[in-house]
Image (cartoon, coloured by chain):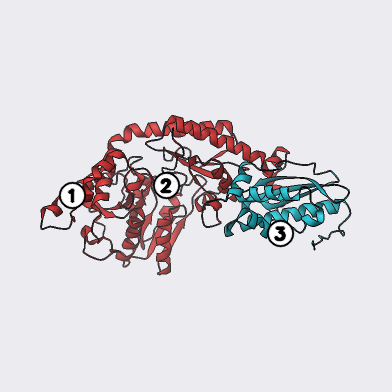
Chain colours: A red, B cyan
Amino acid sequence: MKVPIYLDYSATTPCDPRVVERMLPFFSDTFGNAASRSHAFGWAAEAAVEEARSQVAQLIGAHEKEIIWTSGSTEANNLAIKGAAEMYAQKGRHLITAVTEHKAVLDPMKHLETRGYRITWLPVDGRGHIDLQQLEDAITDETVLVSLMAANNEVGTLHPLAEIGAICKQKGTLFHSDATQMAGKLPIDVIAHDVDLLSLSAHKMYGPKGVGCLYVRRKNPRVRLTAQLDGGGHERGMRSGTLNVTGIVGMGEAARICREEMATEIPQVQALRDRLQQRILGELPDAVVNGDPEQRLPHLTNISFPYVEGESLIMGIKEIAVSSGSACTSASLEPSYVLKNLGLGDELAHSSIRFSLGRFTTEEEVDFAADRVTGEVKRLREMSPLWEMVQEGVDLSQVKWTTH
Amino acid sequence: MAYSEKVLDHYQNPRNVGSLDKDAQDVGTGVVGAPECGDVMKLQIKVDDGGKIVDAKFKTYGCGSAIASSSLATEWLKGTTVDAAARIKNTQIVEELSLPPVKIHCSVLAEDAIKAAIDDWKRKNGKLPAGGEEQSS
C-alpha cells in the first residue's frame, strides 16, 4: 500500500489508464482541428469528437446533438444559467436555486442579481433537501430557470431530480442540474428526469481535467441559450473555440467506462464507504454523519468529530488525502457554508471531514484510514479542553466563552 | 498550507499537555477563545511563594498553529517569574514559530491565555484590586 492514500475523489479523480491510452494518439498523430473541414486531419479529429459526444450522450440518456463541449462544469454552469437568463429575459427575470449549490452556480446567480434579475435562494433541511412544495410555490410566470444540483459536493445529498423535473415541466420553466458529482457514479436519465440542461465534468469521472460539457435539450422543449463565448460559432453557436480534441476523446472514453462498469462499481465502492464509516463510528460513537445517510452518493461520507478541530485533525492524518469543512484550510475564515446551511454549528462545521472513495480505493486503504483517523481524534481529544469539560459533565452550550 | 518545522514539532510532540488542579491556591487558570471561532485554549500555571512559575500545562482545541502556540507558551512559562511571563508578547510567538499572517490570531490567543492565567492566580492570592484586571507593565 502506498501512502499518502487518496480519499478525495470528489475533488478530482485520477485518469483511468484506459482513458490515457485512448487519448495518447490525439496529441501528435491525430492532431487535427475538428473544425477543419477541408482535409483528412480535420475529419479524423471530428470523427473522434463525434464518437466521444455519443459516448457522453449515452451516459445520460441524451442524443449526441444535445452535447455542447465546454472546459468543465464551471463553464457549463455559467453557460446554462447566464445563457438561459439572457435568452429568455423577455419571458421574465427570475431564477431559482438552493443555498447549498456549488459556487459555480451561486456566483453566476449573484452576477445576474447585480444585473437586475431576481433570484430565489431555497433553504435546505438538516439533511440537505429542499422543500418541493416551496420550490413549486416559488415558480412564477416570470421564472426562466430552476438550477438544482444532482448531488451535493460536500455531503453527497441527492436531490430528487425526477420530482423536481416534473414540477418544472408542469410549471413551464427550464430545469438545469449541475451533475458534476453524480455523473458516472449513479445513473442519470435526462428524459426520465425531465432535465433541460445538465452540467458534467470529465475529471470527476476518471477523465482529464479541463473538459466537460453541457447537455442542452433539443426537443420538448427546444432550449436555446445566449452564447457566453463568441468566436467561430462552434458547438451550434453556443460555445465558440477550437475543441480540446484530446480532452474530449478522454471524456468520451471515461463516460463509456463509467456507463459499462457502473452496475458493478456502485455496490463495491458503497461497501467500502460503509466499512470506513462503520469503523470510525464504532470507535468514536459521538462522531456525526452529515447530510442524508440514505439519499446520498455511494462513495462519499462527511463526518464531524466533536471536540477536535478540523485543521489539526487534517494535519495529523497527512497520510490520508481528504477535504475539510474547516475554515483554516481555505483562505476564508468562514467554515463550510454548505454545512452551516444544514444547520450545523460552527464548531461541528469546523471539525468535519469529507471522505470520498473511488474506483481505485482498496479495503486495505480504508482500514488504514479508519485507524489513523480514530487514533488521531483520540490523541487530539486528550489535548482538547472541550473534551475535558464534557468528561467533567460541563454543558458546553452553557459556558460563557471569551470570543476574540 | 505549509507549516514551519517548529509548528510541526510542537503539534506532533506537544510539551506540557495536561491539567493542574484549578481549585488549588497556587494555580492560575486561563481559558480563552470560543468553540465557534475554532480555538479554545486552556493554560494553567503553578506559582511558588517567590512568584516563580514552577509548572505550566495546556489543553487546546484549535488548529496546529494554536496547539503549537500554547505548547511553546508553556515551555517559556516554566521556570520564569509571573512578572516576566506577563511581558510575553504574541509577536515573540509569531517569530519563534514563523506563523503566517492568517495564524497570528493563534499567538494573540496564547498571549491572552497567559494573561488570563496570571490574573486568575493574582485574584486568588489577593494581588488584584477587587473586580479589576491589572494590566501588566
Report helix, strand or loop for mark 3: loop
Q: What residue would you read off at disc 1?
A: A30
Question: What residue is shown at x 25% (from left), y 50% (from top)?
Answer: A246
* Residue B25 located left or right of residue A169: right
Q: What residue would you read off at disc 3?
A: B89
- The spot of residue B52 in percent (x, y) is 83, 50
- The spot of residue B64 in percent (x, y) is 60, 48
How many other residues sit within 10 Å of disc 1, few (<14), some (14-19) or many (≥20)? some
Cα distance in 3D space between marks 2 and 1: 31 Å
Same subunit, tags 3 and 2 = no
Cα distance in 3D space between marks 3 and 2: 40 Å
Q: Which quadrant, please, contains the N terminus of chain A?
A: top left
Question: What residue is shown at x 76% (from left), y 59% (from top)?
Answer: B87
Q: What is the three-letter code of the residue carrying label 3?
A: Lys
In this view, the residue in front, A159 or A100, is A100
Q: What is the three-letter code of the residue carrying label 1?
A: Thr
Q: Quadrant of residue B137?
A: bottom right
